[in-house]
Image: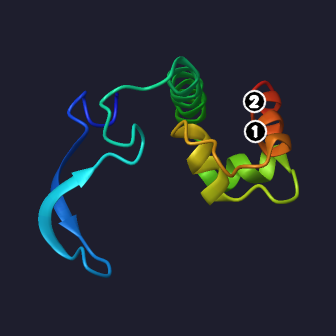
Amino acid sequence: CIYCHGMGGGEGFSCGPGASGYGWIICLRCQGTGQMLYAQLEQYRRGRELHAKRIARHESMRAACERVAVPGLTCVELSKIEAGRWEGVEPRLIDAVFEGVNQ
């Protein structure tokens, strides 16, 4: 897993019912297995490539959302796409962002 480097998690602070404090936190990306599926790795790779292109254009997230001009595309959604965390993001938004890279 590229997030936990195969360790299944890491040490850190957490807040929540019955789980507050410092300790071991299971990686939310690989669910503690230390491994990722090929599809997850591909989403991550494509998202980082998208991020690099936006930065090369000296473009903020807000400006990128305005340029792509798709209703529902927010900086939060764009951040998820660029980080390769596409779960819960509408497919039409993902498609619009990748189509908008060449605009």
Q: Is residue 11 left or right of residue 82?
A: left
- Secondary structure at badge 1 equals helix
Residue 2 image label: none
Give the percent coordinates (x, y) of residue 4: 27, 36
Q: Quadrant of residue 56?
A: top right
Asked if residue 35 is positioned above or below residue 29 in the image, the reply reads above
Which residue in the protein does label 1 denote?
94
Q: Nearer the viewer, residue 52 or 71?
A: 71
Residue in the image at 43% along x and 26% along y: 36
Q: Residue furthest bottom?
A: 17
Give the percent coordinates (x, y) of residue 65: 74, 51
Determine the CA span between mark 2 and mark 1. Answer: 6 Å
Cβ–Cβ below 8 Å for labels 2 and 1? yes
Viewer can see residue 60? no
Q: Amino acid at mark 1?
A: Ile
Q: Is residue 100 left or right of residue 81?
A: right
Viewer can see residue 100? yes
- Secondary structure at badge 2 equals helix
Give the percent coordinates (x, y) of residue 94: 75, 38
- The quadrant the C terminus occupies is top right
Give the percent coordinates (x, y) of residue 40: 54, 28
Disc 2 crowd, CA 10 A, few/some/many (<14, 14-19, 20+): some
Which residue in the protein does label 2 denote?
98
Asked if residue 75 is positioned above or below residue 48 in the image, the reply reads below
Residue in the image at 32% along x and 82% along y: 17
Disc 1 crowd, CA 10 A, few/some/many (<14, 14-19, 20+): some
